[in-house]
Image (tube, rainbow, N blue to C red):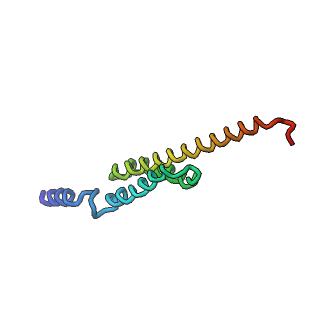
Amino acid sequence: MATQGAATASKALNPAFNPKTVHFWAPVLKWGLVIAGISDFYRPVEDLSVNQNAALTATGLIWTRWCLIIKPKNYPLAAVNFFLGTVGAVQLSRIFLHHRKLRQQATLVLSKIPPNAS
């Protein structure tokens, strides 16, 4: 009985999510990536990297799922990874829309050139 009480007290004093563990610091520090991604919303689309944002999206989505499978479940890390994936997906959609607009403009310009123009 005393051993069980000591184990319960130890668990209460040292939870899985506290500043002494990686379960606390991983999500806290990873918010920096999310903030950096959000600050890129103000950058011109031409300066954005498809590879970088694809990596952020994939990392965010994969690790969100993983944080919900592991024990103990790390909901704060899952939340930050979800937002990381979302920020990357938003940036990828900006890049995609920009490239689509450029293709449409190029098609419009080419359609206005007469076929006999040399």
Write the residue at 42% across / 48% down: 83
| Residue with the most extreme left position | 2
Residue 117's place in the image compared with 54, above or below, is above
In the rendered image, which quarter is residue 5 located in?
bottom left
Pick the quarter of the image with the C terminus.
Answer: top right
Left or right, residue 89 beside residue 101: left
Q: Nearer the viewer, residue 23 or 111?
A: 111
Q: Nearer the viewer, residue 116 or 96?
A: 116
- Residue 71, percent across and down? 35, 52
- Residue 34, percent across and down? 42, 53
Residue 22's place in the image compared with 91, above or below, is below
Pick the quarter of the image with the N terminus.
Answer: bottom left
Q: Nearer the viewer, residue 77 or 38?
A: 38
- Residue 19, percent across and down? 27, 62
Left or right, residue 26 beside residue 37: left
- Residue 31, percent across and down? 38, 55
